[in-house]
Amino acid sequence: MAPRAGFVTGGCWCFDRNKTIPFWPGEDQSVSVQSVLTRGGGSACNFAIAMRRLDPAIPIETIGLVGNDEEGRFLIAECDRHRIDRSRLHATDAARTHLTDAFCSERSGRRTHFFEAGTSDLLAPAHFDFTATTGRFLHLGLPGIHRLMDARNGGDANGWVSVLRAARAAGLRTNLELVTIDADRLASLARPCLSLLDTLVVNDYEIGALAGIDTVAGGVTDIAACLHAARVIMELGAMSVLAVHYTMGGFALSRDGALAQQGSVAIPPELVAGANGAGDAFAAGFLRVLHDDGPLDEALALGHATAAASLRHIGTTDAIETRAECLALAERWGWR
């Protein structure tokens, strides 16, 4: 049997309406939308396309659910355009495709998401069939915005646990992507998954939510608190590697206690169009190196380089280039 290679992305496929606004208004106030860009979105979509841009040759499959509608057909066409195996990207008449309005503030560079779950609420463990996959890694997300997957499934705490167990039984290495939701809800959904993960790549807020530790105060990352939280979660899970990223940098822990740290890329502020998809981009770069059993410092560097490249466009993946080109941009701009 040939060795496994490539990635299977599973979970959230949505249709993004990326909207640029000059600043985020207060309640009862108004602000003009300056531009609208429609793209594919969601963790399964963003990671798959980011990985294809990084590496045009690596095998990529996906599993998800879209509607039999214009937006669903758009997402299917995106798979074909990026040569992603969509044989298990299911379409249904039972709901419309998941829609997201992603507002990006020019003033802060931050993004805020409003979504209509649609087909995401109907995605279930039964949609995930790993019998024919040849991939090496499963990248799965997003707990908290998928009604059936978030619910108990037989004897499992939720459908995410069921899917991760099936993936591991099929020989896949597993990674779970999270979304910034209420901390208690995030922890209740993701903690039962920890014993079934080979890797976990999260941001500063998410690692704190998982551990029940305050890691961000007033928009400022407490790196020491993040490291403490990461060590707590490493003890609770089966991960061989846990990575945490934040605006100024990131670190990665291995099961044997090794720690790698890396500042983020000092991209010129005038080149930043928006942070939408930057976390997906970091995960793609980081896991591309781990796919080949590369060292943690190289994984962090490519993660940061990929995220920095993505910041140049309001779309989640439009500005990502090849692995070599992303690293060249990082060297040109320098490291924090």
Image (spheres, grey):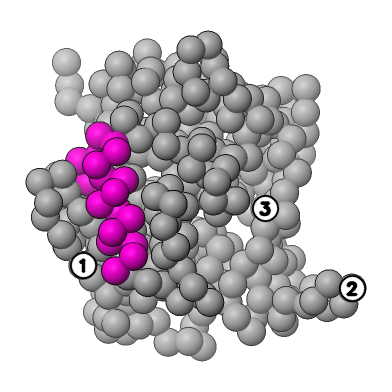
Q: Residue at x 89, y 73 (%)?
A: 28
Q: Residues within 10 Å of mark 3 (few under 14, many from 20)?
A: many
| Quadrant of the snapshot with the C terminus | bottom left
Q: Of callouts 2 and 1, which one flags the residue occurring earlier in the amino acid sequence?
A: 2
**Residue bearing mark 2:** 28
Q: Which mark is residue 16?
A: 3
Q: Of callouts 1 and 3, which one flags the residue occurring earlier in the amino acid sequence?
A: 3
Tell me the element at label 2: loop
Q: Is residue 93 above or below residue 34?
A: above
Q: Write the start and end of the magenta stretch as one range.
A: 224-243
**In the image, is residue 238 part of the stretch drawn in magenta?**
yes
Q: Residue at x 27, y 75 (%)?
A: 263
* Residue 133: percent from left, percent from top: 35, 21
Which amino acid type is shown beneath numbered disc 1? Answer: Gln
Question: What whole-number distance in Å separates the C-alpha atoms at marks 1 and 3?
Answer: 33 Å
| Quadrant of the snapshot with the N terminus | top left
* Residue 19: percent from left, percent from top: 72, 67
Query: Is residue 169 visible in this depiction of the protein?
Result: yes
Q: Is residue 297 left or right of residue 226?
A: left
* Residue 203: percent from left, percent from top: 42, 59
**Residue bearing mark 1:** 261
Q: Residues within 10 Å of mark 1 (few under 14, many from 20)?
A: some
